[in-house]
Amino acid sequence: MAMNLTVRYFASLREALGEQQQVSGLLAPVTVASLRQHLAGTSPAHAAALLAGRAVRCAVNQAMVGDDALVPEGAEVAFFPPVTGG
């Protein structure tokens, strides 16, 4: 099944990648790690910000998750650096 997701970026990731983007056509199952890998392949800026090994936190539908978490269809996925200012 092809999935559609909303990806949002915060703090320094927002400055590098923009506020949000729609992602469509991914085949389920999608994990946070596989989504990061997919996004990293979309542009050099995405690669620099999201490749594995970079310190990036993630929330799926506003719940903090790890890289192995499954991402459901229609989810809002948020990426942000480990420490963000107010």
Image (tube, rainbow, N blue to C red):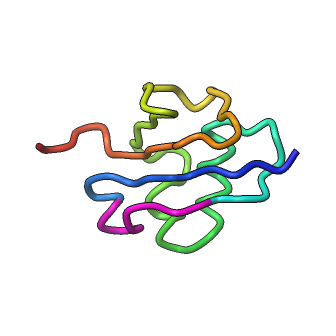
Residue found at the very far front of the displayed protein: 74
Quadrant of the image containing the N terminus: top right
Residue 76, percent across and down? 52, 43
Quadrant of the image containing the C terminus: top left
Q: Is residue 74 left or right of residue 16?
A: right
Q: Is residue 12 left or right of residue 47?
A: left
35 vs 5, nearest the viewer = 5
24 vs 17, nearest the viewer = 24
Q: Residue visible at 57% across and 73% down?
A: 43
Residue 25, percent across and down? 79, 58
Residue 30, percent across and down? 73, 39
Residue 4, percent across and down? 70, 52
Give above or below for 68 relative to 36: above
7 vs 43, nearest the viewer = 7
The magenta region covers 14-22
Q: Residue visible at 47% across and 71% down?
A: 45
Give above or below for 37 relative to 59: below
Q: How many marks?
A: 0
Residue found at the very far right of the displayed protein: 1
Give above or below for 13 relative to 60: below
- The answer to which quarter of the image holds residue 9 is bottom left
Residue found at the very far bottom of the displayed protein: 44
On whether residue 57 falls in the magenta region, the answer is no
On whether residue 19 falls in the magenta region, the answer is yes
Q: Residue visible at 65% across and 52% down?
A: 37
- The answer to which quarter of the image holds residue 28 is top right
Q: Is residue 34 left or right of residue 29?
A: left
Q: Is residue 23 left or right of residue 60?
A: right
